[in-house]
Amino acid sequence: MTKKYDVIIVGAGIGGLHAGIYLQSENPGLKTLIVEQNDYPGGYVSGFTINGFYFDSAAETILGYAKSSSRAILQKYDFYHPIHTVEPMEAYYNDNHVVRMFSNPELFLQDIEKVHPDQSAGVRKLIETSHQIRKDIKELSLDEGITFGKLLRIIFKRPVLRKYARKNYKQLLDEFITNDEVKDYFKLFSLWFGLKLENLKAPILAYIISVAFTEGLYYPEGGMGAFAKKLAELYVTRGGELRYKSTVKKILIEKKTAKSVLLTSGEEIQADYIIANSDLHKTIFEYIGKKHFSRRFTDRIRKIETSMSGVLLYLGIENYDLSKYPAHLMIGRTSDITKNYEENDFNVDGIAVRIPNNSDKLKARPEKESLIVLTFAPYNWNNFWKIGRNKKRTKEYRELKKSIIAKIITKLESFMPNISKHIKIKRLATPMTFERFNGSTNGAWYGPKVNQRLPSFKSQIKNLFFAGSNVGGSGVQAAMSSGLETGAFLMRKMNKKLLKEY
Ligand SMILES: Cc1cc2nc3c(=O)[nH]c(=O)nc-3n(C[C@H](O)[C@H](O)[C@H](O)COP(=O)(O)OP(=O)(O)OC[C@H]3O[C@@H](n4cnc5c(N)ncnc54)[C@H](O)[C@@H]3O)c2cc1C
């Protein structure tokens, strides 16, 4: 059996990397190992290059990163990566008019005033209310050592937060906006959760609106691939070991204690502690096995629903002037995109288009440009994308992908004339692709849906912990914080154990 580590982390996703960086930076004497099935770090926070065209593979933006505590913690460890915002955050092309959403709400309101003059007062009020809710939430979370009685008194003193505490996002939007198209603009902030507006809590969405309309959304320079690589370098520089192309088949448990990981190669590696940054359902039911958990716990995990999935079309474009378009644009209504998962159907009526090189107009334009199109799609659509349940790629699957690529390009061309003649690379990722490359149950984009009680990062098994979207919630920011939280908890635990031993 291979040498023993203090900690093994399963998966070099953004959560696993953050847990590893925390542990190695706080105690460089530790021996930690991250095992990753792919040959690149970051999981959904990654990028790839084909024939000189660079693409972010999945996530592209980090909400509220500039002032986040995860960034502040990593800066302590000398990690710095330049970030920029994208303006407009989104541009909506509908019925011969364009509405652009900027982080400066006054600029957004100028477009609203032009296109929907009767909605402008409501939009302004919605943004102001969101700022107030965020302020209230921040004050609440800053107050340490809070008791329940104190909490009640504090909420009582915050009438705005109190008013919206029990409302959902639909109710929040309905209160201020009467026009469906304008409501659609604000669906941008709920797209990341893949849930119906009724299932999203008003204060959480108000918080996000407030962050977006003060700070904007952050994009790491050079794309997510460069960001994740730098994080992986930091981990290794601090003494961590990172092994790629190493797939965990089992997490072995002995006497109710996590003991080792067994790789698909047959190698078994021991550790005192194991952190699973891999998919929640797979970790519990495939890698560990239900017999090691209580029936109550496995029943609860079985009921946890995965978030939605979708398709991403990566296009490599040459000799076409993309500079005249915004970096982010939506063709068709946002509700066309959400319809796909609400009605368990798939079409390309609404698509989101991303042109990364337009986010920084000062940069010299490369000859090879990338353009990414995305929309939601259910995992089980069309008999699991014509490959059935055995997951074997078939000719029918490839043909289906070709037809979807053609449909998306036709839609794009209605907006960007003749672009098809300039496309050098076309690759389509379906829910099956996300499942295969990230090990995500149902090809879920955001881990478990956020409107459910997620399990704690502390497991029922001694010395086994979780990190990432599995326990921390949707999105890059949540996965980072979760990795740091798990790392910090484990650090304290190890220190306590050391103290006892002396
Ligand atoms: C298309 C798309 C767009 C998105 N856009 C955004 C966005 O713009 N902003 C945002 O905040 N969020 C976005 N998200 C969500 C966000 O990317 C994720 O919530 C977050 O990155 C999850 O990080 P994680 O570390 O928890 O997990 P993951 O990124 O899923 O990492 C898990 C890692 O574990 C590895 N692994 C799994 N099983 C094994 C095994 N058996 N053995 C070894 N390794 C294993 C995987 O290969 C992977 O590297 C997007 C997601 C998708 C798919």
Image (cartoon, grey):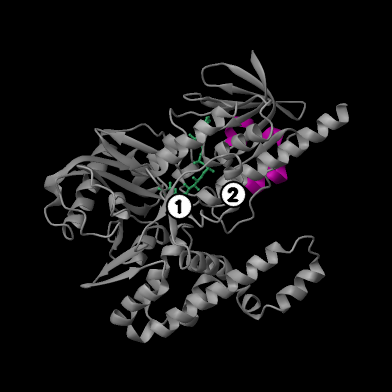
Which residue: 35% across, 65% down? 334
Label 2 Cα crowd, 10 Å radius (few <14 / some 14-19 / many 20+): some
- Within the magenta stretch, is there residue 288? yes
How many circles with numbers are drawn on the protein? Answer: 2
Q: Position of residue 371 (x, y in %)?
A: 26, 48
Which residue: 55% across, 21% down? 263
Q: Is residue 406 left or right of residue 299?
A: left
Magenta residue span:
283-302
- Which sits in the foreground, 273 or 311? 273
Dominant SS type (magenta): helix
Which residue: 29% across, 79% down? 115
Q: Position of residue 502 (x, y in %)?
A: 88, 26
Q: Secondary structure at mark 2?
A: helix
Location of mark 1 (residue): 308
Picture quadrant of residue 235: top right
Which residue: 51% across, 53% down? 65
